[in-house]
Image: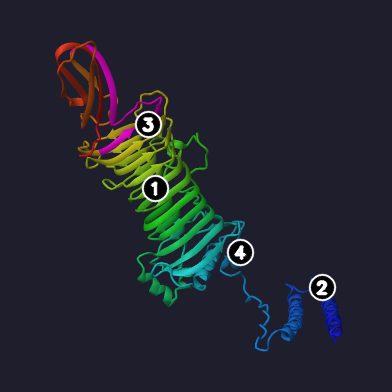
Amino acid sequence: MEATMPRKALTWSMLMGFASFIIIHACAENYEMGRHQFSGGGRFRDDMRKMQEFKASLIRHDSISAAPPSVSPSPSPSYVDPPPGRNSARVYHVTSYGADPTGERDSTDALAEAIADAFRGPTEGFLIDGIANLGGAQISLEGGYYLISRPLKLPAAGVGNLMIHGGTLRASDDFPTNGYLIDLSASSSPNENEKTYESSISAQLSSSSSYNYEYITLRDLMLDSNYRGGGISVINSLRTSIDNCYITHFTTNGILVQSGHETYIRNSFLGQHITAGGDHGERNFSGTAINLMGNDNAVTDVVIFSASVGIMISGPANILSGVHCYNKATGFGGTGIYLRLPGLTQTRIVNSYLDYTGIVAEDPVQLDISNTFFLGDAYIVLKSINGVANGVNIVNNMFSGSNNGVGIVQLDQSKGPFKDIGQIVVDRNNVRGMNIKSTVGRRSVQGNGTSWTIDFNPVLLFPNLIKHVQYTLSTGGNAFPNHALRNVSNNRVVIESNVAVPASVFVTVDQGVAN
């Protein structure tokens, strides 16, 4: 009896293996013979499902015979075909809406319809209060080149987690000259296509959040404004990402950021005219590449190769890093970076490259410019509006010029002198072919007499301003005269002694000591 049971088990296993081989072989033959007729493999999936069910029944048979009666078999999974549609889940391919990827026909309506469909899609709760989560819906441009005759706008405010990516947009010859190719603003008068979608939920959301949108990503795009306006407008949005974009032929702004919070612009290239420097029309460059009219934004690893102003900042607490500006040279009237928020700058410019075009800061308060390279006599201007300069660090930079006597930091006091000055540090800069300007001066003088005068005007940035002096008077021999600091007016330090002695005087002065 004990020998009979193993033989039965072996025979049963051989039969089951042979049956499985026949079924698999038959299914494979059916698939090979008819695979060109199945259009997606529906019959093959049915055969595979039947085979899996049969195999599972055999396994269940063995399991039931060996397992306790209380254990019930789990049902086998079954394949469910995806619902029919022209798009995969939450990826909206614009060509399936009739967009022309060759750029020969206008694709505005098709692109607007794809965006509207994304808004109709399912949501996954909320991001910040009042912003519905679209779950990462994507508008795929599929590497095409699309002509548009009006700005692409989102149908309604109050949504987030949406991406537009992967292609080129070009403004048509009748594109509005005050428009932007992509306009992230809540439209007060939507066009006919945008009117096709406005659900009651969207209407409620647009009024329940202080932001229009959250977490909108614009990536891998080339935007050609065709000298008919701007590239991207981001109005009152939260956590917007503009990544790996090439924006050109704008006349207003390449990118405009107004209000909102935390727009990140990175790994991008902007220029009104496509050039790599030395453009014969550089004197006529106009427009602003990036206009930040809000706070807490970041511009990192960005090249601006032509515009009148590279980056305009009129909001606090922004950071620029790895920015290369060679737009319109200072000698032609251009500005690399313009900080226009008198009295509340709060901006950091680090690890950047100002190439023949400099930085202008109005009434700078809390400004850091460090570890940046200035080439071609590019310099920094502190511009007086109300005469305030406080909390400014211009340190550890490199300046390279052409020996034309250009100062690395200059004052524009055409609207009045700076009179409220404190915590200013301009020091430790590496300078070649330009004039050093600093708030810290170190000089020495030698002489035989009772008075020593050291003139710091060639070095000090602010006129007639010395807040702190340290000096050492060293005499030869056994002379120990009495000596004192007598005067610091007009940036000249005067040291006097009570008797005539040969001496060396070492003096350090500082214009920026805290009040």
Q: Which residues are magenta?
A: 423-449
Disc 2 to disc 3, C-alpha distance: 75 Å
Q: Nearer the viewer, residue 209 or 481?
A: 481
Q: Which of disc 2 and disc 4 is earlier in sequence?
A: 2
Asked whether residue 240 appears in the rendered view, the answer is yes
Q: Quadrant of the C terminus?
A: top left
Image location (x, y in percent) of residue 261: 38, 58
Other-residue count near label 3 (Cα within 10 Å), few / some / many at <14 / 14–19 / ≥20? some
Amino acid under disc 3: Asn
Q: Which mark is residue 28?
A: 2
Q: Main SS of the magenta segment?
A: strand
Q: Which of disc 3 and disc 4 is earlier in sequence?
A: 4
Disc 4 to disc 3, C-alpha distance: 55 Å
Q: Left or right: where does residue 470 sit relative to residue 76?
A: left
Other-residue count near label 4 (Cα within 10 Å), few / some / many at <14 / 14–19 / ≥20? some
SS for dot 1 = strand
Residue highlighted by disc 3: 429
Amino acid under disc 2: Ala
Q: Which mark is residue 319?
A: 1
Disc 4 to disc 2, C-alpha distance: 36 Å
Q: Which of disc 4 and disc 1 is earlier in sequence?
A: 4
Q: Nearer the viewer, residue 437 or 335?
A: 437
Other-residue count near label 2 (Cα within 10 Å), few / some / many at <14 / 14–19 / ≥20? some
116 within the magenta span? no
Residue highlighted by disc 4: 95
SS for dot 3 = loop
Asked whether residue 466 appears in the rendered view, the answer is no
Residue at (39, 59) in percent of width and height = 235
SS for dot 4 = helix
Q: Which of disc 1 and disc 3 is earlier in sequence?
A: 1
Q: Left or right: where does residue 166 sit relative to residue 322?
A: right
